[in-house]
Amino acid sequence: MDTFLLSALTVGVAEIGDRSMFLALLFGLRYQRPWPIFLGMALGLFLNQALSAVVGIWLFQFLDSSWHAWIVGIAFLLMAAWVLVPEKDDDEAPELSKRQLFLAAIVAFFFLEMADKTQLVVVTLAGSQQVFWPVVLGATLGILATTGPALWLGYKFADKLPLALLKWLACALFAVLGVWVLLGAMGVTGGAEGLSHLLPPEH
């Protein structure tokens, strides 16, 4: 699996039941102009992932390559726990005119993703691989794959989604990946080698 697909998959799974998904549901429920919201949401999310990737690439340049597998494994375990943290549901949406929705969506989704678990994924993947575009575009696609449908469905279908079950499945996926990579870093399994395409070559 290449970096683009891995980024899209992990971020998409992480976004299940996330606050960005609920914000998209809220926008879809309250406003009747989905396209300006979707375009603003996409741009805001892209800018946030781009910032995260730059930070990850810069940060990993100062870390010895022997630590990269450990960081990736620990990050996956943190994701496993983080995905189960309940999201706060804000029932109040700001009153906006239709002409303000594009800018409002950019700002809302850019800042909403700050300190979010998806940032941890992007920082880790971009830093360990030392690539920008595959991680950023994959992460943006992964988020939009979750938030995009939520925008159009709206809250009237939200109660029919088995979010609790989906969150536990996502937790299990990240936990298995994390343990596998850490065991590989300890030389117990081939986990680290199996994800060698995520790590920069040693010099």
Image (cartoon, helix red, strand yellow):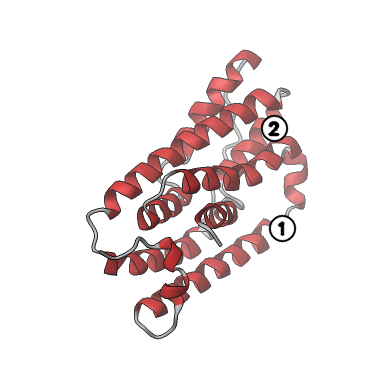
Nearest the eye: 183 or 26: 183
Residue under the image location 65 percent in, 35 percent down: 26
Q: Is residue 144 above or below residue 160?
A: above
Secondary element at image label 1: loop
Residue at x-position 28% and y-position 69%: 66
Q: Which residue is mark 1?
A: 162
Horizontal and vertical percent position of residue 36: 64, 23
Examine the rendered structure and indicate whether residue 180 appears above or below residue 89. below
Residue 169 quadrant: bottom right
Q: Amino acid at mark 2?
A: Gly
Label 1 crowd bin: few (<14), some (14–19), many (20+), radius 10 Å:
few
| Quadrant in the rendering for residue 95 | top right
The spot of residue 120 in percent (x, y) is 41, 53
From the image, tell me which residue sits under label 2.
28
Q: Position of residue 27 (x, y in %)?
A: 65, 31
Q: Residue at x 57, y 50 (%)?
A: 15
Q: As drawn, is 167 to the left or to the right of 121?
A: right
- On the question of residue 174 being in view, the answer is yes
State which quarter of the image contains the C terminus: bottom left
Query: Mark 1 vs mark 2: which is more N-terminal?
Result: 2
Is residue 179 in sight in this rendering?
no
Residue placed at 61% from the left, 43% from the top?
21
Q: Which mark is residue 100?
A: none
In percent of width and height, residue 51 lies at: 39, 39
Q: Secondary structure at mark 2?
A: helix
Three-letter amino acid code of the residue under disc 1? Pro
